Image: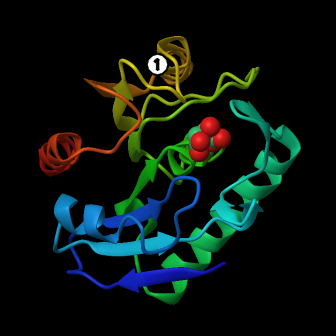
Amino acid sequence: MEYTIKKGIEEEPVLILLHGTGGNENSLMDVGKALNDQATLIGIRGKTLENGYPRFFNRLEEGIFDEEDLEARAIELHEFILTLVKENQLDLADVVLVGYSNGANIGVRLLLDYPESYQKAVLFHPMYPVVVDDKTDLSQTHIFATMGEQDPIVTVFESYRVMELLKDRGAEIIEEWTKNHQLTFLEVERAKKWLNE
Ligand code: MLT
């Protein structure tokens, strides 16, 4: 997978930056710097393409995920993160997933599938319109999430649905509501405050 890395200070977090549809490994680097300029930042590019726009997994249409692809891509991304952590002598315990939109959505999948590996995440405007039967224990998972009151991509119903999915499994979530799907300076500031608490 394509990625970019900016090494930080050892005791600081390792932010795994997962872009939205049409982004790339560099899209969230400035957001990462704004969240913590001493952190190690790793931006990863999603491997699938939708009309030339990178994503982390395919969708059948807007709001309908290709669940088979999502499953396979989550495994691939997890293995890639583990390799990067090892190769760069980082500590998995320091990893924080930071995803926006499609990147937040695959972030949700990683939280659900690998609760022992990922226990902290910043999810900007996620959705997860998938029926999940497993009752994974997420009681060690801490999340900061933002949702838009008038988001044309993620409806309020879908915002509540993804939050309930995570909360039902015991995750601790700090929620912030914004206007729409756009990632704003203010929500990055709030996420920064949460990360540094
Ligand atoms: C998705 O497909 O992951 C969501 O619709 C968000 C997005 O448009 O990327």
Q: Secondary structure at mark 1?
A: helix
- Would residue 115 be visible to someone looking at this image? no
Q: Nearer the viewer, residue 95 or 156?
A: 156
Q: Nearer the viewer, residue 138 or 69?
A: 69
Residue 74, placed above or below residue 42: above
Counting from the top left corner in percent of width and height, residue 6 is at 33, 84
Q: Nearer the viewer, residue 28 or 153?
A: 153
Q: Quadrant of the C terminus?
A: top left
| Residue occupied by mark 1 | 167
Q: Residue at x 35, y 36 (%)?
A: 142
* Count of picture labels: 1
Position of 93 with respect to 187 (left or right) is right
Residue 35, picture quadrant: bottom left
Residue 186, placed above or below residue 63: below
Residue 91, placed above or below residue 196: below
Counting from the top left corner in percent of width and height, residue 139 is at 44, 28
Quadrant for ligand 1?
Answer: top right
Q: Residue at x 84, y 50 (%)?
A: 69
Residue 22, picture quadrant: bottom right
- Would residue 67 be visible to someone looking at this image? yes
Q: Residue at x 48, y 20 (%)?
A: 159
Q: Residues within 10 Å of mark 1 (few under 14, many from 20)?
A: some
Position of 2 with respect to 121 (left or right) is right
The amino acid beneath tag 1 is Lys
Residue 92, placed above or below residue 155: below
Position of 51 with respect to 12 (left or right) is right
